[in-house]
Image (cartoon, coloured by chain):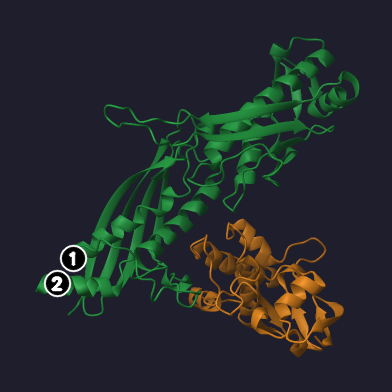
Amino acid sequence: MTKVPVQFTLNGSEKAEFIDSGTTLLNALRDKIGDTSPKGGCHQGTCGACSVIIDGELRLSCLTLAETCNGATITTTSGLAEGGVLHPLQRAFLDTFATQCGFCTPGMIMAAKVLLDHTPNPSREDVVEALSGNICRCTGYEPIIQAVLSAARANSQNAA
Amino acid sequence: MAIRRGRGVAAINYPTGMNLGGDPTQALVHSTPTGNFMVTLSSVDLGQGMKQIMAQICAETIGVPTDRVVVDTADTDTGPHCMGTFASRGTHRAGNAVIQAAKEARQVMLEVAAEELEVNASDLETDGQGNILVKGAPQKSISIFDVALSAHFKRGRSISGRGMFLIPRSHPEKETGAMKPSTCYAHACTVAEVEVDDETGEVTVLTVKNVFEIGRALNPKMVEQQLVGGSWMGISHALYETTEPYYPNRDHGGTDFNQYLMPGPGDLAETEIIVLERPSADGPYGAKGPGEMCANPQIPAVANAVFDAVGVRIDTLPITPERILRALKAQAN
């Protein structure tokens, strides 16, 4: 199969790869680049586990072709911690016990980050709406909702 | 046609593990040269937190802080035998095996410490912070770090232990058929409040109040997490989830997450969790298995609440709008 070049910024560093045309961004990230934080749950856009942030927008990496991401800026959950210090959302997920098996967690955190980037002080309804494309088997969602609300509170206290 | 409200209650007993063919789990514990402890298991952590709990159990038994214990569940080919992580058996079976292994390792550790301190091993105790002290004379002490170094480089001892926990196979009595298929029951009771639309058959769970008796909660926050998720899953089983809605006919079964229904973050019932701790006699530090048990009582509670609301008994899961409307129609006829 013809290889095509792709080049994008992933979590602040430049990446360039030759990939098979038609490769999803999910597979390119996991298999070519080695960032396994986006998870392949359904591979058809129904579970949200593969969510990443492309140019500031929440995207399903399983439905995004890698070759359409040329020049894009991509953020995944593995890029959130800075210098070993967890992102407030990661901290909040730990503190509120919002993760069990952990498979949905990176996608949940991506969805929550986009929410908080646009709406720093969300209501519970905002959080529910933002997470509605992500499914979780273990937690019953309530701890995840609480984690996002708690991260938002921590952010606003830091900003104040 | 109206929205009708109902309340249902259900109580359950639920076993920990099973013993129809014997139910064993084994564990190995050994120290590193610097006095950290390694627990080797084949039991798998599925996210329920087994590694954390086994580290706590090993640490408590040996007398070191939990962060001094590493749990390796890496390989079922090479690890000590475990039947598996199912039937709510992980904490109970593996925990008992870890206690036995850790006790043996602790005994060796105290023997080495006794040689170093020139006292009798039975006169020693641990402080839980990584030190071994002479009872009544705590100024005479040695760190577990130094004991491990001594064992490895001076005394030629392995600070290690073997653990084996087996619930033996239960055979039915020939006369009566009576047997003991399971042990160590956990208990739960749930009260569910629902609204049922008798025109559409749709059920909304308003509140679900659960009481769980789970032996001792070895890690209360993780127990709470398990119970909150389990309560949600119970409601999901009661009202939504099925792979074969017209079993045994396979038609209309969900084949992906679009069709396989589960409640999402917008469909949550107000949930209350109360934990009762009645330590079990044969559990590791009194623990029972809260895993599967916690997703069960919501199902009959919701079914009873539906009956209370609209007067029909649905005896097939999930309790779908279609089943409610068919039952209402049959009742009217």
**The N terminus of chain A: image quadrant:** bottom right
Q: Residue B204 location, x and y as percent?
A: 32, 70
Residue corresponding to mark 1 = B312
What residue is pinned by disc 2? B330
- Label 2: how many residues lie within 10 Å, few (<14), some (14-19) or many (20+)? few
**Badge 1: few (under 14), some or many (20 or more) residues near its Cα, within 10 Å?**
many
Residue A132 placed where, x, y %? 52, 76
The reply to whether residue B127 is in sight is: no
Chain (green): B
Q: Identify whether B118 is placed above or below B107.
A: above
- Name the secondary structure under disc 2: helix
Q: Which type of secondary structure does the marked residue at label 1 adopt? A: loop
Chain letter, orange in picture: A
Q: Tell me which residue sits at (48%, 29%) in the image.
A: B168
Q: Tell me residue B76's x, y (percent).
A: 67, 45
Q: Of the residues under marks 1 and 2, which one precedes in the sequence?
A: 1
Q: Amino acid at mark 1?
A: Val
Q: Give the letter of the chain under mark 2.
A: B
Task: Indicate left or right for B228 with B119 as reference.
Answer: left
